[in-house]
């Protein structure tokens, strides 16, 4: 008869070893459930937030706040549509962690959508609705539409998406023309780098 392994012997003779193994197994199970459940839970939450923001962006109060440059952090600022990716989401003002639970947020130090300057927007790639999940699939010539309470415009990608470091703030610098910059984490599921999409204004669609 072959000798039993030390692990088997320990489990048979030491109750504390069996308890430790049981606890470890439960922790592994909870960890696995967390990995699967967390993105799902954030997506559900973001869907609820987007419903509220969609109503807010159409309200007279938000329109007045936008005209007066008084949109508060976490409030609706613009709707972003990216036809190639089937993206349609409301972008809030601000890039704080709480604001970005809406999925995407406007860097407050950058220009407003459709204004002269560089309007920059950060978005999640794997959680909170992951509106920027597939930015890497965009190509030069693809379009981005921004709709605000007072008007809409279209930008066109001036080059393919590119990768930079999280400390590279040059992509947020002001411009003398109407441009848009989208940022998200890269690679997917990691914050090691930043994926950048940039486009130039093509035309205004409407003005309220």
Image: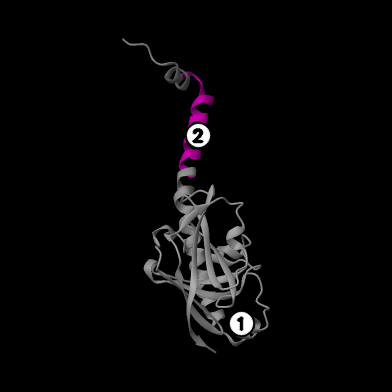
Q: Is residue 103 visible?
A: no
Of residues 139 and 91, the one nearer the viewer is 139
Q: Residues within 10 Å of mark 2 (few under 14, many from 20)?
A: few
Question: Residue 199's spot in the image, x, y percent?
Answer: 48, 68
Residue numbers of the magenta segment: 13-30
| Residue shown at 53% from the left, 69% from the top | 180
| Mark 1–mark 2 distance (CA, rounded to whole Å) | 51 Å
Q: Main secondary structure of the magenta part?
A: helix
Question: Which numbered circle lies on residue 126?
Answer: none
Q: Quadrant of the N terminus?
A: top left
Using the rendered image of the protein, determine whether residue 22 is visible from the camera's viewpoint. Answer: yes
Which residue is most to the bottom?
208
Image quadrant of residue 68? bottom right
Q: Position of residue 46 (x, y in %)?
A: 51, 65
Q: Which mark is residue 24?
A: 2
Residue located 66% across and 74% down the image: 72
The residue positioned 57% from the left and 63% from the top of the image is 100
- Taking the magenta stretch, the answer to whether it contains residue 75 is no
User: Residue farthest to the front?
Assistant: 176
Of the 4 image quadrants, the one containing the C terminus is bottom right
191 above or below 171? above
Secondary-structure class at tag 2: helix
Callout 1 crowding tier (Cα within 10 Å): few <14, some 14–19, many ≥20: many
Q: Is residue 23 magenta?
A: yes
Question: What residue did someone put label 1 on?
Answer: 62
In the rendered view, does 171 fall on the left or right side of 7? Answer: right
**Mark 2 or mark 1, which is nearer the start of the sequence?**
2
């Amino acid at each position: 008869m072959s000798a039993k392994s030390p692990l088997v012997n320990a489990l048979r003779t030491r109750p504390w070893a069996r308890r430790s193994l049981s606890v470890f197994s439960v922790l592994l199970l909870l960890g696995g459930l967390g990995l699967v459940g967390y993105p799902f839970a954030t997506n559900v939450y973001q869907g609820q937030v987007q419903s509220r923001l969609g109503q807010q962006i159409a309200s007279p109060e938000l329109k007045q706040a936008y005209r007066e440059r008084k949109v508060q952090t976490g409030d609706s600022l613009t709707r972003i549509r990216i036809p190639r990716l089937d993206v349609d989401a409301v972008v809030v003002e601000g890039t704080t962690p709480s604001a970005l639970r809406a999925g995407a947020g406007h860097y407050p130090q950058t220009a407003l959508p459709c204004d002269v300057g560089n309007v920059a927007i950060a978005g999640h790639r794997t959680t909170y609705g992951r509106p920027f999940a597939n930015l890497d699939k965009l190509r030069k010539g693809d379009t981005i539409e921004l709709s605000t309470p007072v008007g809409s415009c279209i930008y066109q990608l001036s080059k393919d998406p590119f990768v930079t470091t999280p400390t590279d703030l040059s992509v947020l610098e002001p411009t003398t023309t109407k441009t848009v910059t989208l940022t998200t984490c890269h690679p997917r599921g990691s914050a090691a780098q930043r994926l950048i999409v940039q486009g130039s204004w093509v035309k205004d669609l409407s003005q309220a």
